Image (cartoon, rainbow, N blue to C red):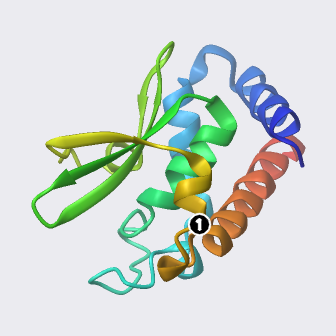
Amino acid sequence: MTTEEIRALFAECMKRVGSKATRFAVLQRLCIKAWCAETADPGFSQPFDPHMPAQGQNDVTALVVNDLCGGTIYHAVNGVYQRYYNWTHESGNFDVATVAGQEEYGSAWSEVHREQLLADESKRIRERYELLRERVIAAMRNALAA
C-alpha cells in the first residue's frame, strides 16, 4: 500500500468518526490495537506488557504516524532515554509518549530521516515497522467495515 493510499484510508477513518473524535484520539486507538510484543523494541529494558503496550514502540510508531499524517520525525534524548517523535506542523505533536500517557520529552532534539531510522538493523526497525504498519492498516479496515 502506498503512502497516498494509507493516508486516504486514514482520512476515511476520520470521516467515519466525524467530529466525535480528534485525529489524535483516532491515532491513539489505532496504535493501542496494533502494538504487540513483535512490534516492540527487542532491546527494551522490560518485556512487552499488554497493560502498557506503548513501551518500546516509539521508533516504529513515529514511522507509522509519519505515514498517516506526514510531518517530521525527531529523535529526543533525555539522559538514558531515547525517544522518537513525529511532528506534524499543521496539526500539532503526535507522538507515542503522549499517546501512551507518558509526558517525558527529551532535552536534545534532532531531525531523523526515515531511511536513516529504518536502516538501524540492531533493533530490527524495518521489520517491526512493516508489521506495525500492516496491523494499523488492518485496524483501519476493521473500523471501516464495522
Frontmost residue, 140 versus 17: 140
Q: Residue drawn at (77%, 46%), measured in percent from left and top? A: 140
Q: Is residue 44 above or below residue 85?
A: below
Q: Quarter-wise, where is residue 128 in the image? A: bottom right
Q: Residues within 10 Å of mark 1 (few under 14, many from 20)?
A: few
In the orientation shown, which residue stands out farthest toward the left? 79
Residue 113 coordinates in the image, percent (x, y): 53, 45
Residue 5 coordinates in the image, percent (x, y): 88, 36
Frontmost residue, 140 versus 89: 89
Apparent side of residue 106 relative to residue 123 in the rendered image (left or right)? left
Q: Quadrant of the C terminus?
A: top right
Frontmost residue, 104 versus 14: 104
Q: Residue drawn at (14%, 42%), measured in percent from left and top? A: 107
Q: Is residue 128 above or below residue 65?
A: below
Residue 103 coordinates in the image, percent (x, y): 20, 44
SS under mark 1 = loop
Q: Please indicate, yes or no, whether residue 30 appears anywhere in the rendered image.
A: no
Apparent side of residue 43 relative to residue 146 in the rendered image (left or right)? left
Residue 92 coordinates in the image, percent (x, y): 42, 20
Q: Amino acid at mark 1?
A: Ala
